[in-house]
Image (cartoon, helix red, strand yellow):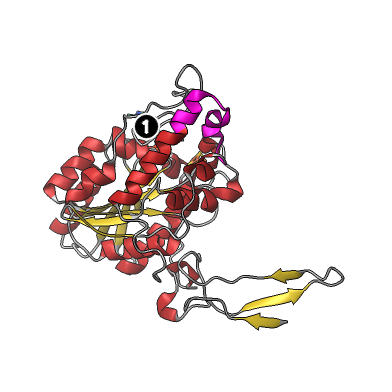
């Protein structure tokens, strides 16, 4: 065994082992940078919440999410970080949707914190009421998190969310964006991307899949307030954003990209890969904004064409059939990614250490 020191201050030596009889080298690569999930090899200050034996296990075993569910992963990271930041003084309100259903099959629960199920469309309003009740009963130190899927947030729950923003209620709202109504069988939401196949936007006709030029970009609508986007592609960043948000009062919003293997037709083992390709292609930009201004974004380390992201998901299979429409749709999706890259300066800081 010999050792090489790779480039970059965040990396530890890479052991290189000669495979017996093959002459080939098996290189085990331990990356301890921001892409790492819960690395205990970093300096204590750089470790994630998940690397701690004292983590809260906000969602513990026994839940019934599909294998590879990005929403389960995102929620676990977000809530554990929130619990650490508040030292457990928090309440979560959950809109109806996959997260609520797979964590609480009656009479069981996977939640290890005070947790309320609201209706599908009113999580933000219920959370606002919980925050007000805590305040008026002298327990204003207990923080409130509301959470819902993209359907519960960008569609039916949008009025309540808008009211929460307008009143600057003391709630952190987490939207787990899997780009459709997964719990009821993959129907289109206003967060479904153009060209994607869902149960209500079938891959048939002259322009298969979801239409271009419609939908709702809630992070941009919410930008007048303290907001951020995050992804299970970068769990360390997700934890950091939740931790920061728990230290702020007033209305806050984090939009979290959570691949859904069942609805997207991706391999369960590829959930993180899918999320990373969304970010590296520019289709899902990671950024933060306060008072209407973008205050930071996560640079793309290695830009990939949108096709790299799309081709590993069956919901976009009709874009790889060689038709004229498919070529036009792919070009349009690439333009969306390029526009995101320019808007959020995603390639400006390439080469700098994060
Ligand atoms: C008023 C109302 N309409 C419809 C439903 C049925 N319903 C339950 S969950 C759900 C979809 C949830 O989708 P989303 O918010 O995107 O969360 P996901 O399941 O994808 O995580 C729907 C339509 C309901 N519970 N209440
Ligand atoms: S349908 Fe999608 S979001 Fe729902 S539990 Fe399965 S993988 Fe997760």
Residue 270: x and y in percent read 58, 49
Q: Nearer the viewer, residue 45 or 247?
A: 45
Residue under numbered circle 1? 189
Q: Quadrant of the N terminus?
A: bottom right
Question: In this picture, which residue range is highlighted in magenta?
Answer: 312-329
Does the closest atom of ligand 1 sit within 8 Å of the Cβ of label 1? Answer: yes
Q: Nearer the viewer, residue 255 or 67?
A: 255
**Few, some or many residues within 10 Å of mark 1 (<14, 14–19, 20+):** many
- Name the residue at the bottom extreme: 2
Q: Nearer the viewer, residue 116 or 327?
A: 327
Residue 105: x and y in percent read 49, 42
Examine the rendered structure and indicate whether residue 26 appears above or below residue 61. Answer: below
Residue drawn at x 33%, y 33% is 190
Residue 313: x and y in percent read 55, 38
* Residue 116 appears in the figure: no
Residue 240: x and y in percent read 35, 65
Residue drawn at x 16%, y 41% is 163
Q: Quadrant of the C terminus?
A: bottom left
Examine the rendered structure and indicate whether residue 198 appears above or below residue 289. Answer: above
**Position of residue 13 in the picture relative to residue 302 (left or right):** right
């Amino acid at each position: 065994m010999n050792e090489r020191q790779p480039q970059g201050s965040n990396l530890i030596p890479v052991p290189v082992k000669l495979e017996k009889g093959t002459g080939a080298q098996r290189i085990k690569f331990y990356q301890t940078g921001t892409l790492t999930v819960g690395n205990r090899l970093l300096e204590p200050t750089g470790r994630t919440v998940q690397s701690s034996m004292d983590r809260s296990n906000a969602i513990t075993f026994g839940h019934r999410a599909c294998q590879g569910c990005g929403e389960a992963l995102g929620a676990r990271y977000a809530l554990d970080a929130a619990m650490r930041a508040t030292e457990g003084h928090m309440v979560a309100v959950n809109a109806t949707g996959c997260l609520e259903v797979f964590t609480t099959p009656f009479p069981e629960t996977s939640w290890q914190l005070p947790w309320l199920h609201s209706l599908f469309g009113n999580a933000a309003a219920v959370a606002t009421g919980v925050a007000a009740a805590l305040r008026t009963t002298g327990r204003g130190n207990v923080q409130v998190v509301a959470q819902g899927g993209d359907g519960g947030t960008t569609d039916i729950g949008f009025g309540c969310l808008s009211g929460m923003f307008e009143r600057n209620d003391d709630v952190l709202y987490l939207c787990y964006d899997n780009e459709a109504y997964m719990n009821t069988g993959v129907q289109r939401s206003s967060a479904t991307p153009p060209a994607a196949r869902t149960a209500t936007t079938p891959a048939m006709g002259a322009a298969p899949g979801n239409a271009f030029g419609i939908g709702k970009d809630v992070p941009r609508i919410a930008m007048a307030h303290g907001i951020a986007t995050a992804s299970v592609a970068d769990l360390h960043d997700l934890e950091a954003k939740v931790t920061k948000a728990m230290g702020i009062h007033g209305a806050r919003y984090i939009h979290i990209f959570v691949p859904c293997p069942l609805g997207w037709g991706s391999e369960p083992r590829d959930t993180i890969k899918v999320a990373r390709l969304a970010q590296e292609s520019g289709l899902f930009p990671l950024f933060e904004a306060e008072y209407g201004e973008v205050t930071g974004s996560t640079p793309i380390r290695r830009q990939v064409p949108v096709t790299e992201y799309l081709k590993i998901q069956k919901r976009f299979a009709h874009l790889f059939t060689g038709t004229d429409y498919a070529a036009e749709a792919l070009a349009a999706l690439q333009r969306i990614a390029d526009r995101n890259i320019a808007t959020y300066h995603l390639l400006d800081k390439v080469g700098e250490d994060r």
